[in-house]
Amino acid sequence: MSTDIRLAFAHPEARAEATASTDPRDRIALRDYLVEAEIGAFQTERGQTQRLLFNVVVEVAPPAGPLEDDVDRILSYDRITESIADELAAERLNLLETLAERIAERILAAPRAMRAFVRVEKLDRGPGALGVEIVRSRAAVPLRRSDDDGSDQALHPLVVYLDNAAIAAPDLPQRLDALEAHKAPLVLCVGPPAGREGARQEHLPAAVQRRIDLLSIEENAWRLAARDPRCLVVASRTEIDWAMRQGQPIVWAPSKLVLDSPDGPLARAGDGPALALWLAEVLAARAVMVPEGTRLSAGSRVSIETFPATN
């Protein structure tokens, strides 16, 4: 059985462990929690309860100081069971997907909760269990800017992934003009240079290969910046925040932020679109834009938009 299939049917705790960063968080888990509730879109499901089985894993940020055996300093298991009970009591729902989303949202409102895996199964709809499983991350807090008139504005940038064809396109300046017309801070992301997508050196340690992948993307970032004087290559969160407040279009050099972040996408260090989506989530972007046909992971909080691929 392949790893993907094994993880698909394993407990969410196995999926959380498999997708953890190199600096993994603490995890708490709720296994095989059985509840009876009325739910379902079909007429046969109305007016009667059915058994629902919940399995939930929550990744939490490490405590800032000693726990001192104090329950108030942890994320309690009660947070999970109460989130389930509160959402079931709030209103009758048709979809397990809606229920799972709302439970995850409640859990992630806790200060230390960072990522939630929620699996919900119906046990009475057939000979097997029918269910859904979702993973959701804590919503990022947007950068804010104080304007001259004293008003305070949340900045939700537009993150755009440009492939190599778009970088080399003769009409790149006109494309940037169109992107700036969105009136949002513009963050441009790229992948490895042409011919080096997915390239791997044999027998290199994983950490070394990640560095090579990230440096390759940074080489392409400078190549893009050289094509238009508006583009400023930036690496740190401080530089990104400053540029967004100034309305300066930027090209992201990913090494520093990816390597410094506890949940940086190290396993996708050579995947330009995946890095762009991660950055969009970190920056609470209004949307991430990618060429048509680009594959991205499902379940992001950030809206994904597409534009025609460059021929």
Image (spheres, rainbow, N blue to C red):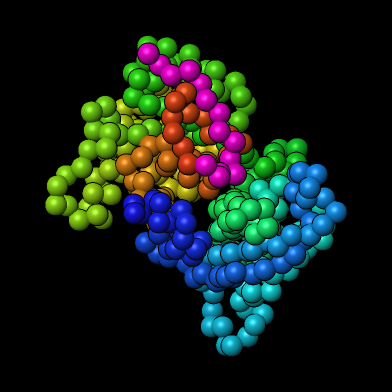
Instruction: Count the numbered circles shown.
Output: 0
Which one is in front, 299 or 174? 299
- Position of 136 relative to 110 (above/below): above
**Picture quarter with the C terminus:** top left
Q: Position of residue 142 (x, y in %)?
A: 62, 46
Residue drawn at x 16%, y 44% as measured from the top left: 201
* Residue extending farthest right: 47
Q: Give percent across and percent down for residue 299.
A: 55, 45
Kindly report the secondary structure that dominates the magenta region of the rendered protein.
Answer: loop
- List the single residue furthest toward the bottom: 69
Residue at point 52% right, 17% down?
177
In the rendered structure, the answer to whether residue 165 lies left or right of residue 285 reads left
Between 227 and 149, which is closer to the camera in this rendering? 227
Q: Which one is nearer the viewer's eye here, 165 or 19?
A: 19
Res. 28 image quadrant = bottom right
Q: Position of residue 290 (x, y in %)?
A: 48, 28
Q: Is residue 38 above or below residue 166?
A: below
Residue, far left: 203
Q: Which residues are magenta?
A: 298-311
Residue 4, x across and y down, in percent: 39, 51
The residue closer to the viewer here, 150 or 130, is 130
**Residue drawn at x 62%, y 78% as measured from the top left:** 73
Q: Is residue 68 magenta?
A: no
Q: Does any portion of residue 221 appear in the rendered image?
A: yes
Is residue 252 toward the left or the right of residue 137 in the image?
Answer: left
